Amino acid sequence: DHSYSGVSTLKVTFEGKNGISDVQKLSTIPALSMTTSTVSKAAMTDVSITITPPEANVRTVVMADGTRLYQEVDYTYSQGTLKLLKNGAMKDHLVMGDNNITITITADVKLTYKLKLTA
């Protein structure tokens, strides 16, 4: 009898020399090349933000209203360049004036980028 209930269990064991950690060691203290920019609501453009060091990984990007952005839909990230896409969630979650965007990168370092929306 080989009945199958539709439920399976998989056990995995990781072995190594040290504990497993999600902390990446970076060559320098993480920073943004610039911490503010301006975009026009009438002529929305992609917003490029340079993060150093370039080997840092972006974990989350959160708009001022708490909206979490999704990679490849709302933003792209490659080799230290974070690009907020004009056709992503950014366009619907900016308010006139200053908008603080929180970028969490490797080792849970939080960086704040101020994006000013003008008419």
Image (cartoon, rainbow, N blue to C red):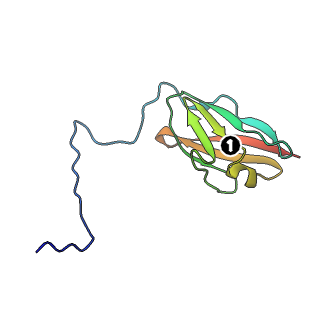
- Residue at 72% in and 44% down: 86
> 30 or 7, which lies in front?
7
Residue underneath mark 1: 85
Q: Position of residue 110 (x, y in %)?
A: 57, 42
Q: In the picture provided, is 119 more to the left or to the right than 84?
A: right
Which image quadrant for residue 17?
top left
Which image quadrant for residue 48?
top right
Task: Specify the quadrant that holds the N terminus.
Answer: bottom left
**In what element is the residue under mark 1?**
loop
Farthest-out residue, left: 1
**Is residue 50 depicted above or below 99 in this figure?**
above
> 83 or 20, which lies in front?
83
Q: Position of residue 81 (x, y in %)?
A: 61, 31
> 29 or 93, which lies in front?
93
- Residue at 51% in and 33% down: 56
- Residue at 80% in and 40% down: 39
